[in-house]
Image (cartoon, rainbow, N blue to C red):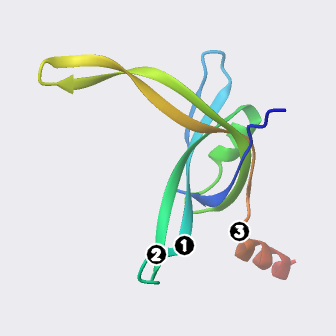
Amino acid sequence: MNINRVTLCGYNGKEAKTAATQNGRNISRLSIATTKRYKDSRQEWQEKTQWHTCVAYGSTADHAAKIPTGAHVFLEGELTYREYERTIETDGGPIKVPWPVTEVVIDSISVIDRKQKREERGAA
């Protein structure tokens, strides 16, 4: 059995970058932040934020593109690795190097802003 599953609950860091593939399929890229709280060696609380590059396709991309910056989101997807060729400047001039990319390909994403949901229920 093989499982490649990622579940994240975090915050949308910036507006989605949207585009279309060569086939015309919509694509949205998000940057999701998760923060871990822990006690250091002096027993003082510290926080460490991790940023996750996430990508969605098709109708999921359309939905993801509408999620505002700072929204609390829950997403599920698959971890992927790929490379592309990138040009970097060196003392000897520009050279092309393989550049690794790690992404979460989103299967589903939803906003879980509880405060907003409470306000909607109170208004109804």
Task: Give the CA separation, mark 2 to mark 1.
Answer: 6 Å
What residue did someone put label 2 on? 46
Residue type at the position of mark 3: Asp
Earlier-in-chain disc, 3 versus 1: 1
- Earlier-in-chain disc, 2 versus 3: 2
2 vs 3, front mark? 2
Q: As shown in the figure, which amino acid type bears the numbered disc 2? A: Gln
Left or right relative to 12: residue 115:
right
Characterize the local packing of mark 3: few (<14), some (14-19) or many (20 or more) Cα atoms within 10 angstroms.
few
Tell me where residue 80 appears, x and y as whole percent: 62, 32
The residue to which callout 1 is attached is 37
Q: SS at mark 2?
A: strand
State the residue at coordinates (54%, 25%): 82
Return the x and y of residue 111 as percentages of the image width and height. Answer: 72, 59
Sequence-wise first label, 2 or 1: 1
| Residue type at numbered disc 1 | Arg
Q: Eyeballing the image, is 84 above or below 107? A: above
Image quarter of the N terminus = top right
Q: Is residue 47 visible?
A: yes
Q: Nearer the viewer, mark 3 or mark 1?
A: 1
**Which residue is denoted by mark 3 in the rendering?**
113
Circles 2 and 1, Cβ within 8 Å, touching? The answer is yes
> Disc number at residue 78?
none
Q: How far from the left and from the top, in percent, is residue 17?
A: 53, 40
Counting from the top left corner in percent of width and height, residue 4 is at: 73, 37
Residue at left offset 57%, top offset 45%: 30
